[in-house]
Image: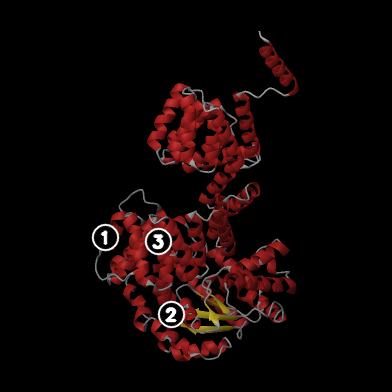
Amino acid sequence: MNRAERRRQERQQRKSRTSPAPPSVREEAISFYNEGITHQKQGNLNLAESAFRRAISIKPDFSEAHNNLGNLLTIQNKWKEAEKSYRYGLQKSPNNTMLLSNIGNTLHHQGKAREAMDVLEKAIRQDPQYAYAHNNMGNVYTSLGNHDEAIKAYRLALNLLPDAPDINNNLGAALCKQARYEEGVAILHETIRKYPRFFDAYLNLAEAAITLGEMDDAINILHEAARLGPDNDEVYGKLAKSYFTKTEYLAARSAASTAIKINPKAADHYFWLGRTLHEMNLPDDAEAMLSKAVAMQPDNAEFHNSLGETLKKKKAIQLAARSFERALELDPENVNGHTHLALLIKHDSYDKIMQSMEQLLKNKDLPDEERISLYTSLGKSFNDLCDYETAFKYTSKGNDLRKGISPYDINRRKSDIREMLDIFTSTRLNQQKDSGYPDCKPVFITGMPRSGKTVVENILALHPLITAGGESADFIQACNGALKEETRATFPEGIRDADSELFKAVGIEYERRLKQRFRKTTIITNTQPFNSDYIGMIRMCLPGAKVILCRRNARDNCLEMFRKGFTRGHLYSFDPDVLREYFLLQTDFMNQWLKRLPEFIHVVQFENFIQNPRDEIRSLLEFCDLPWNDACLDIDSLPSPEQVIGVWKNYEEYLKQLFDKLDS
């Protein structure tokens, strides 16, 4: 060893004593990998991704880093990129079952079910004990609608990994999709009990509650989920759907708007917001939202159907027809598209729509709700052709099916009316005449369904000081909300001991709801027929309000209710005997309100309104303390007397017993 070499080694030794040895390639890669894990746990996904990619750049065969990078990308729904990362890792570690299973999962989320199954079968052959390969196979079967095989796969996975919350969640959801709710809901509840922060179980449990019609439970579950995942748009989307189903439209609008704010790229959120705005009688806003949903998912038949409904409300008949026709092009067996179009147009021949509806009825697996809808629409269509015998046949079939599913308790209705009249006595109404909130002055248009309420509202809404509010449950909800908060009782029992403060609170809450719905500061109408039960309450809460009671010839009114095929409420209308008894009962009930509050209620007889509109409109405006406005004389929009008066005669031989009993 020469002197120079010796000095070089001495320098190296001194350097090694004063500086730490440089890390190996593997150690440096592991350092970045661990850094990525830390960032991911803290929710810093961008930093985590950067760290994983740095680890891979240092050590390209680092299969764990490839796998975690793939997992990170799946969290962000970047399925194609995730697949690429997993496949690169698999090249370096070809016997890694976990990577193979994860590739199958990414293929499933890209809609490549067959490829996903091939990859997952290979993973299971390679390692039958790897639980998540079975779980991911179950997910593929679920997406294909094969819930039997999905359940088998999830159970195999749970035999290997019984406490995995995600697999238990998947099994519970699959059982619910197979309508095995008792088993599925029990598993989801148990998953939440063991893992109270496992978010997806809340979503699946809420979805089961929605399907079962248990909206209060769904809403409570979703609020729990929102506390765990306040930035998850799916929670608010399901909340919007739940509140919409409960007709709590203000809450539905708020939830859907929040969902859109979180995720403006999800078409479903615009759909539910649009449907909500439609029900809130805000058709322009509804059209804007539903058009966005259609633009984002132009092949969604249900979106086109809902847009068509809103265009129909706006009287854009041709555009509405195009929407319904497009829905049928996308889904020729779509029942909603057929029924909406059939109800929109006036048939002048036995056309393709009618033929197609009759063909759809031959499907033995058709759900009852869709079957009822088809019967009702065919009844209307044959009525257009003046084939009243066939029209009655189809209408009766739909009504018989409905009353078999949802019978109406007329004795319960009699008891409710007795209780309301017992609470809202003339003495009490007189004593409370100065109570409530006088600053809010809405117009309530009530009466039996099909008695002319919408016609009256449309004429009133031509006045510049009136805005049509449609069938809103806002007053009913304001009333019951205040009762629940103050007395923990419901209407009408909770009113027995209520004081003037509660009545004022209800009035203020109703005004708040109106201001949330409408930008205008005009008088808002409300045509909710069930407001007839609340006339006494309206008087005590809103002494400045006006109530218009619409009445129609008993035979015409009952026939039109019988033919309508209501999709919500009005279960009395499907049985002629019950309908007759209900109509007479309700007529007596309204007579009692007129007797107790004669100055508060204005009666509009529909036939007079149609035959002598000028005088009737003038009288109506005077009652509402509104100045005359010539715009209200746009009577061309009114139906002709021939269209709406005496229509019962077409069905006299089929409903003779109903009509005779009405007369007696």
- Whether residue 412 is situated above or below residue 450 in the rendered picture: above
In the image, which is nearer the foreground, mark 3 or mark 2? 3
Q: 25 or 334: which is nearer to us?
A: 25
In the structure shown, which secondary structural element does the residue marked by tag 1 occupy?
Answer: helix
Q: Farthest residue in the top direction?
A: 1
The location of residue 383, given as percent across then percent down, is 31, 70
Badge number at residue 355: 1
Q: 412 or 606: which is nearer to us?
A: 606
The location of residue 210, given as percent across then percent down, is 53, 51
Badge number at residue 553: 2
Q: 566 or 425: which is nearer to us?
A: 566
Q: Is residue 431 visible?
A: yes
Amino acid carrying mark 2 in the image: Asn
- Examine the image and state in which quarter residue 149 appears: top left
User: How many numbered circles are shown?
Assistant: 3
| Disc 1 residue crowd, few under 14, some 14–19, many 20+, Cα 10 Å | few
According to the image, label 3 marks what residue?
A: 305
Nearer-N-terminus badge (2/1): 1
- Examine the image and state in which quarter residue 204 appears: top right
- Whether residue 411 is situated above or below residue 95 in the rendered picture: below
What is the CA distance from the residue labelled 1 to the residue labelled 3? 20 Å
The location of residue 83, given as percent across then percent down, is 46, 36
In the structure shown, which secondary structural element does the residue marked by tag 3 occupy?
Answer: helix
Q: 282 or 585: which is nearer to us?
A: 282
- Whether residue 362 is situated above or below residue 555 in the rendered picture: above
| Disc 2 residue crowd, few under 14, some 14–19, many 20+, Cα 10 Å | some
What is the CA distance from the residue labelled 2 to the residue labelled 1? 34 Å
What is the CA distance from the residue labelled 3 to the residue labelled 2? 34 Å
